[in-house]
Image (cartoon, rainbow, N blue to C red):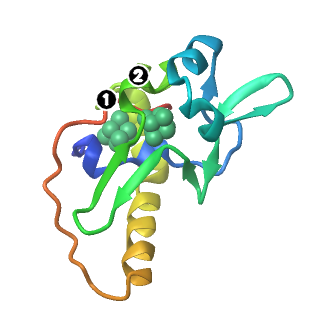
Amino acid sequence: MVVPECTACGTCCFSTLPEYIRVFGCDHDRMDDRARELTHFVGNRCYMRIEGGRCAALTLDPERGRFLCSIYEVRPDCCRALERGSGGCLGELHEKRERPLIALDALRRRAGGDVGSGGDGGAGQGGGPA
Ligand code: SF4
Ligand code: SF4
């Protein structure tokens, strides 16, 4: 399987599960002010908020076909742990590769026109959660 650049992929940031991305105390502290808007609690456990089938911190650029973590520098440890090209990454691609493509397509339709499907890939996202 050809592994795309993370910024042209975003697959591991997609989920519908509210408990998909665990946020531990150290992660929460690192996120500082962003934590309030981007995380939620289930019981006494904290997770990244899920919106529209993806992590609330993920930003999509439908014109360039890019996916960027808006909190890349302070993202949770589980996101840092998933390496591009690892078994976990390949599993994500196998299970969910179509989701970001569908999301991009929906945004393009909403924008009211064909804005192209190009994009230059760019630097990796550094690994999202498994
Ligand atoms: S680490 Fe995530 S964003 Fe990067 S290629 Fe693998 S599934 Fe895609
Ligand atoms: S890398 Fe982690 S925090 Fe950033 S958008 Fe993806 S799942 Fe969310």
At horizontal 63% and vertical 48% (from top left) the residue drawn is: 50
Relative horizontal placement of residue 4, taking residue 10 as reference (left or right): left
At horizontal 17% and vertical 67% (from top left) the residue drawn is: 118
Q: In the figure, 126 relative to 105: above or below?
A: above
| Mark 2 surroundings: few (<14), some (14-19) or many (≥20) residues within 10 A | some
Q: Which residue is mark 1?
A: 126
Residue 80's disc is: 2
Residue at the top extreme, as displayed:
26
Q: Position of residue 75 (x, y in %)?
A: 45, 27
At horizontal 23% and vertical 46% (from top left) the residue drawn is: 4
Examine the image and state in which quarter residue 106 appears.
Answer: bottom left
Q: In the figure, 49 relative to 102: above or below?
A: above
Q: Nearer the viewer, residue 11 or 95?
A: 11
Marks 2 and 1: in contact by CB < 8 Å? yes
Q: Position of residue 41 (x, y in %)?
A: 77, 32
Of the numbered discs 1 and 2, the one sitting upstream in the chain is 2
Secondary structure found at label 1: loop
